[in-house]
Amino acid sequence: MIFSMFSDDGISLEPTEAVKQRNLKLAERHRAKGDYVRHIEIDIKGPIDELMFCDTVEKLASAPAAHSIDLIIDCPGGECFPAMLLHKQLRDHPAERKTAHIVGSCESGGLLIALAADRRIASRKASFLIHQTRCGEYSVTSWTAADFQRQADQFRAIDTDMFALITQRTGIDVSTIQNIASDESPSSIDWCLENGIIHEIAEDRQ
């Protein structure tokens, strides 16, 4: 469902070669002028909502030629579609180095944003959670069984794409992700390291 809405190729949120070349050419034009933003740091802190989405997109748009991006993540999750769109915006950016520094929560949609980085470093105090799509603050006082079924089908479609994205970025088997998500339990930092969710654990400074 999400891939069909936001994907360039219908099967992932990775940029196609054409998109990569287009964005790289744009970056090179900015770099040729000599005066451009070379590095950006983006805070992904607090719940994912419209404000966070707009702030992050604006920051990325202001530095189309940046060579590196650092994401500082302490995020309990939030709205699914903005999280997936931010993942795509970050993947599309032509920066050569994208690093996620996970300093606290990295849960739900926060994890999807972190996975846009090619290098993911977590503090020992970081927490991780993969879970199934949940209902928001909907009024269901007049829903029929068919309404509930349509919503359930939509959630399953979102879960399918979300789990596929995690598989594509980590190599974890989809069935493993499905089992973890259905359990609704946090994943240990050591498991995340072993399975490619993160690449490094940063020892906290005393």
Image (spheres, rainbow, N blue to C red):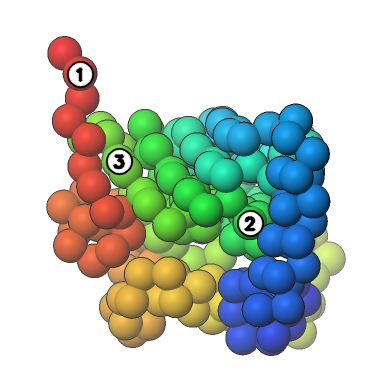
Q: Is residue 195 left or right of residue 170?
A: left
Q: Nearer the viewer, mark 2 or mark 3?
A: 2
The disc placed on residue 94 is 2
Q: Earlier in the sequence, mark 2 or mark 3?
A: 2
Q: Earlier in the sequence, mark 1 or mark 2?
A: 2
Q: Dot 2: what SS? A: loop
Q: Earlier in the sequence, mark 3 or mark 1?
A: 3
Is residue 158 shown to the viewer in this render? no
Q: Position of residue 130 (x, y in %)?
A: 40, 60
Amino acid carrying label 3: it is Ala
Amino acid carrying label 1: it is Arg
Q: Position of residue 82 (x, y in %)?
A: 70, 53
User: Which quadrant of the view contains residue 134?
Assistant: bottom right
Badge 3 is on which residue? 122
User: Which quadrant of the view contains residue 88?
Assistant: bottom right
Badge 1 is on which residue? 205
Q: Dot 1: what SS? A: loop
Label 2 to label 3, Cα distance in Å?
A: 24 Å
The residue at 39%/38% (across/down) is 101
* Few, some or many residues within 10 Å of mark 1 (<14, 14–19, 20+): few
* Few, some or many residues within 10 Å of mark 2 (<14, 14–19, 20+): many
